[in-house]
Image (cartoon, helix red, strand yellow):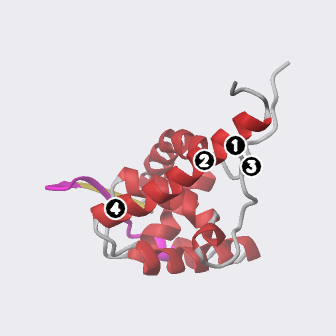
């Protein structure tokens, strides 16, 4: 029997709203897919980087969470582009995504407590990390990845997987 429950917070629509929030907070700047994938994760886990309380609970094996997000964020961006909430352009840096013409009015219409908190965290995240060079951003993400590898290794040890 197939599980028909929705993938809460992890469908293209939810990821799309997060991407629009990030890109609107960054306007007029734009980001590539790799940075948006990382920022999508960090947006709901701001507490992990010294920011406001995280919107989502901690997830085990966080490095795996980043790996599955890439396809999801890509689908989300394509969905949001159909409504002029996200734009895509190609320049010397590759394919870049920015806030579309309808991004601000769309976000202004969202009043749910969760979505207000999401927008606040998007603004905090972009203020904190949006201007980092690609090198500096990768260095920050490498620190998280190193921590997650240690976390994975400690789980392996506790399960008796390592001899």
Residue under pointer 2: 150
SS of the residue under disc 1: helix
Tell me which label, 2 or 4, sits earlier in the chain: 4
* Range shown magenta: 90-105
Q: Work out how far the residue at label 2 is from the one at label 3, CA to CA, in angstroms.
A: 28 Å
Residue under pointer 3: 8
The vertical placement of 158 against 3, above or below, is below
Labels 3 and 1 touching (C-beta < 8 A): no
Report whether residue 12 is seen: no
Q: Nearer the viewer, residue 76 or 135?
A: 135
For residue 129, which quarter of the picture? bottom left
* Crowd around label 2: few <14 · some 14–19 · many ≥20 (10 Å): few
Q: Nearer the viewer, residue 142 or 96?
A: 142
Residue under pointer 1: 154
* Crowd around label 1: few <14 · some 14–19 · many ≥20 (10 Å): some
Q: Residue at x 39, y 51 (%)?
A: 34
Q: Work out how far the residue at label 3 is from the one at label 4, CA to CA, in angstroms.
A: 25 Å
Q: Tell how many labels.
A: 4
Front disc: 2 or 4: 2
Q: Name the residue at the left extreme.
A: 92
The reply to whether the magenta stretch includes residue 91 is yes
For residue 69, which quarter of the picture? top right
Tell me which label, 4 or 1, sits earlier in the chain: 4
Front disc: 4 or 1: 1
């Amino acid at each position: 029997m197939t599980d028909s429950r929705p993938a809460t917070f992890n469908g293209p629509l939810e990821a799309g709203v997060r991407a629009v929030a990030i890109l609107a907070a960054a306007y007029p700047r734009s980001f590539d897919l790799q940075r948006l994938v990382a920022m999508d994760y960090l947006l709901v886990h701001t507490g992990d980087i010294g920011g406001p309380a995280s919107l989502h609970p901690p997830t085990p094996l966080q490095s795996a969470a980043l790996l599955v997000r890439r396809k999801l964020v890509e689908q989300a961006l394509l969905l949001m582009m159909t409504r002029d909430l996200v734009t895509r352009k190609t320049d010397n840096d590759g394919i870049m995504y920015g806030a579309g013409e309808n991004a601000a009015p769309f976000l202004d219409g969202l009043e749910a407590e969760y979505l207000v908190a999401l927008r606040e965290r998007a603004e905090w995240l972009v203020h904190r990390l949006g201007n980092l060079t690609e090198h500096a951003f990768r260095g920050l993400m490498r620190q998280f990845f190193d921590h997650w590898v240690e976390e994975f290794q400690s789980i392996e040890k506790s399960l008796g997987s390592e001899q």
